[in-house]
Amino acid sequence: MEINEVSFTGQPPVDAYGPGFFRVANAIHNGGLVLTKKGPVEWVGLSDLDTIIINKEDFDVIFIGMGDEIAPLPKEISKQLLDANVPFEVMSSPSACRTYNVLLSEDRRVGLAVIPV
């Protein structure tokens, strides 16, 4: 088996996550987080869609992590994102972080908006 080291250019991956925090580029971020090519931004959660919408040109899809478990977005939140032409996928935060990192390693234009576990 061949093992290749993964490198990330530009946008940072999620190094780790745990109860109430995310580690990105060796910096701890407490609470929710949005990651795009502009870097990490603190995020209060679904009540703050502006942080996602204003950055929509930076990604082809944004993964929205809902915490420990996958949960559907409230209909009004989905409608706002769809009306703003924001492509998104909803999953648990651990899955969102892993998927974000994998696609980022493939030089894909992805974003991440996650609520901590």
Image (cartoon, helix red, strand yellow):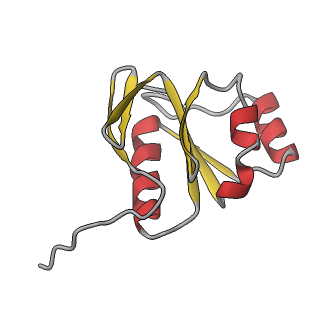
Q: Nearer the viewer, residue 1 or 28?
A: 28
Depth check: 8 or 3 in front? 8
> Residue 20, relative to residue 86: is it above or below?
above
Q: Looking at the image, is 19 positioned above or below residue 3? A: above
Q: Nearer the viewer, residue 24 or 16?
A: 24
Q: Residue at x 84, y 46 (%)?
A: 84
How many numbered dots are placed on residues in this image? 0
Residue projecting furthest to the right = 83
- Horizontal placement of 90 versus 48: left or right? left
Where does residue 67 sit, x and y in percent of width and height? Answer: 47, 28
Residue drawn at point x = 63 percent, y = 33 percent = 72
Give the x, y percent position of residue 113: 57, 38
Q: Is residue 95 above or below residue 93?
A: below
Q: Which is more toward the observer, 74 or 107?
A: 107
Q: Does any portion of residue 50 appear in the rendered image? A: yes
x%, y% of residue 92? 47, 37
* Residue 40 located left or right of residue 83: left
- Residue 114 makes an appearance in the image: no
Question: Where the N terminus falls, by quadrant?
Answer: bottom left
Which of the 4 image quarters holds residue 80? top right
Residue furthest to the left: 1
Where does the image place residue 19, in percent across and percent down from the top left? 34, 21
Q: Quadrant of the C terminus?
A: top left
Q: Residue at x 39, y 20 (%)?
A: 20
Q: Residue visible at 40% across and 50% down?
A: 13
